Image (cartoon, rainbow, N blue to C red):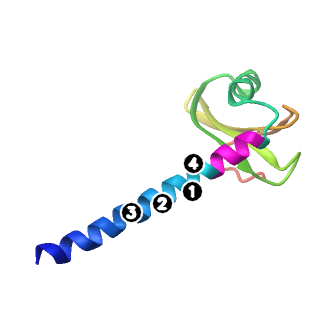
Amino acid sequence: MRTQLVTPLVLALLATGAALTAQAASTANLQAQAKLDMQHARAIALKTYPGHIVKQELEREPGGSGLRYSFDITAANVTHEVGVDAHTGKVLENSIEGADND
């Protein structure tokens, strides 16, 4: 009985670890392709929409160079999504989060 519970748990933990490792490798690959680092992109985003960054990511997305930093910035109970091109630093998006302006 105990072995029947332990085996699926171990397999689930191994699968989770593999997925996290793959995600970390993917993030590192994107960072290696970016010409602008996260710190500079954050500064551009906060200049565009001052507030508190609650989420940040580097992702492939249409528009600009195709590689962008995406920031969710909250100020005055409103959350904006600010997208910064990871190659040029150009602001690609500055919209209210959830407005689906992409």
In this rendered view, identify the residue nearer to me: 62 or 4. 4
- Residue 14 disc label: 3
What residue did someone put label 1 on? 22
| 4 to 38, vertically: above or below | below
Question: Could you tell me residue 51's position as x and y percent?
Answer: 62, 24
| 44 to 20, vertically: above or below | above
Query: How far apart are labels 1 and 2 at the CA level?
Result: 6 Å
What residue did someone put label 4 on? 24
Contact, mark 3 vs mark 1 (Cβ under 8 Å): no
- Residue 18 disc label: 2
Residue 6: name its quadrant. Answer: bottom left
Q: Measuring 43% from the left and 57% from the top, which residue is drawn there?
A: 17
Q: Secondary structure at mark 3?
A: helix
Amino acid type of the residue that numbered disc 4 sits on in the rendered structure: Ala
Contact, mark 1 vs mark 4 (Cβ under 8 Å): yes
Q: Measuring 71% from the left and 40% from the top, which residue is drawn there?
A: 31
Amino acid type of the residue that numbered disc 1 sits on in the rendered structure: Ala
Using residue 64 as the reference point, say whether residue 75 is left or right of it. Answer: left
In this rendered view, identify the residue nearer to me: 86 or 43. 86
First along the sequence among labels 3 and 4: 3
Query: How far apart are labels 3 and 1 at the CA level?
Result: 12 Å
Contact, mark 1 vs mark 2 (Cβ under 8 Å): yes
Q: Secondary structure at mark 2?
A: helix
First along the sequence among labels 3 and 1: 3
User: Looking at the magenta stretch, what is its main secondary structure?
Assistant: helix
Q: Measuring 50% from the left and 60% from the top, which residue is drawn there?
A: 19
Span colored in magenta? 26-32
Residue 42: name its quadrant. Answer: top right
Query: How far apart are labels 1 and 4 at the CA level?
Result: 5 Å
Contact, mark 3 vs mark 2 (Cβ under 8 Å): yes
Amino acid type of the residue that numbered disc 2 sits on in the rendered structure: Ala
